[in-house]
Amino acid sequence: MKIEIIQNEGFNETEITIKAKYIDEELSEILACLSLIGNTVAGEKEGTVSFIPLKDIYYFESVDNKTFFYTKDEVYEIKARLYELEEKLSGTTFVRISKAVISNLRKLKSIKRTKGSRLEALLANGEKLLVSRQYVSTIKDKLGV
């Protein structure tokens, strides 16, 4: 892969052009990362709405008909439903790991097998999430294992 950066004070905005014979797995991953840059999610905490970059979100979770997302140290409520987020985030590093959780694979530190053909995901912030059996193959495919 060849990367060329041209810097010029006359440019008004940053432009990224990708030239490829075809879109392979590596390029798909690069595109997923690029799609997260600049994208934010509106989350509410203590009556204040904040716009959090997707790249800072560890996971989304549905609890008691409410949806939350988690950053390294904070929890925010979001108005969208999990299935809506799953559609919006398709093609990114976010993947459904259980009926109630969509996780950011970029925040994954390690993953290990547990009893019952499930997986335990350890996130970069030390939090552990369980991957349901029905999503194990999806996670393995995304991770290439």
Image: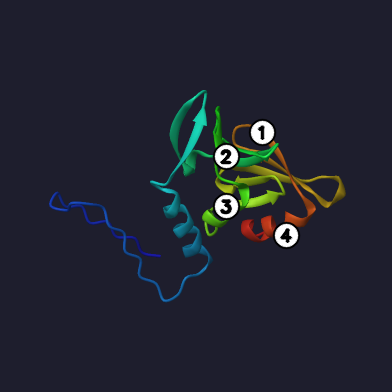
The amino acid at mark 2 is Tyr
Query: Which circle marks residue 127 in the picture?
Result: 1
Q: Position of residue 88 (x, y in %)?
A: 52, 54
The residue labelled by disc 2 is: 58
Q: Report the front residue among 69 and 106.
A: 69
Q: Nearer the viewer, mark 3 or mark 4?
A: 3
Give the crowd class for mark 2: few <14, some 14-19, many >=20 residues within 10 Å: many
Looking at the image, residue 134 sits to the left or right of residue 3; the answer is: right
The amino acid at mark 3 is Glu
The amino acid at mark 4 is Ser
Residue at left offset 55%, top offset 46%: 106
Instruction: Give me the C-alpha separation between circle 3 and circle 1.
Output: 24 Å
Q: Report the front residue among 78 and 122.
A: 78
Q: Position of residue 30 (x, y in %)?
A: 46, 58
Give the crowd class for mark 1: few <14, some 14-19, many >=20 residues within 10 Å: few
Whichever of labels 1 and 4 marks the residue nearer the N terminus, that label is: 1
